[in-house]
Image: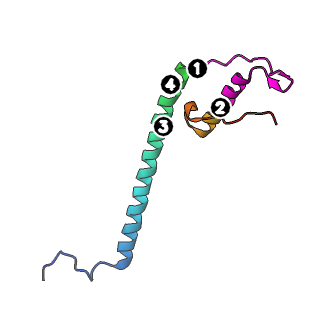
Amino acid sequence: MVKGLFLASDVHWALVCLIGVAVVFVGLAVIIGLVELMNLVTTRTGSKKKATAPAPAPAASAPAQVTDGVIENRDEIVAAVCAAVAEENGTDISAIRVVSFKKI
């Protein structure tokens, strides 16, 4: 028998479980640290991009005039609604197709 080497019967099961749990928690702490670091980096780079290119506010137009059931600026209203729907769905505005548009 060789002295100094551990045999399978020499290692206590509680020690193995304790080391396993410690390794898992240390690994989780490292992952959390990496995610926080990535969040910090992306937040700083994202704020610079937004600060350099502010979007101009659209000019407010007159409310739609309805005379005899006909909307005067129907195309503008349909375009605005399509833009809002595309923005909400996260798609391109060319993917929106208007089948009908009527006042409710």
Residue at 73 percent across and 33 percent down: it is 101
Q: Which residue is mark 3?
A: 40
Front disc: 4 or 3? 4
Few, some or many residues within 10 Å of mark 4 (<14, 14–19, 20+)? few
Q: Specify the amino acid type for callout 1.
A: Pro
Q: Tell me where the magenta segment starts and ends, as one range.
A: 55-84
Front disc: 2 or 3? 2
Give coordinates of residue 42: x percent, y percent: 47, 35
Q: Specify the amino acid type for callout 4.
A: Lys
Front disc: 2 or 4? 2
Residue at 12 percent across and 83 percent down: it is 1
Residue lying farthest to the right in this orientation: 68
Q: Specify the amino acid type for callout 2.
A: Cys
Distance between mark 2 and mark 1 Cα atoms: 22 Å
Give coordinates of residue 62: x percent, y percent: 79, 17
Give coordinates of residue 36: x percent, y percent: 47, 44
Q: Which residue is mark 1?
A: 54
Q: Earlier in the sequence, mark 4 or mark 1?
A: 4
Q: Which mark is residue 13?
A: none
Q: Which residue is mark 2?
A: 82
Residue 31 vertical placement versus 5 (above, below): above
Q: Which mark is residue 49?
A: 4
- Mark 3 secondary-structure assignment: helix
In the rendered image, residue 73 lying in the magenta stretch gets the answer yes
Left or right position of 13 against 96: left
Q: Are marks 3 and 1 in contact (CB under 8 Å)?
A: no
Residue 72, picture quadrant: top right
Few, some or many residues within 10 Å of mark 3 (<14, 14–19, 20+)? few
Distance between mark 4 and mark 3 Cα atoms: 15 Å
Give coordinates of residue 50: x percent, y percent: 54, 25
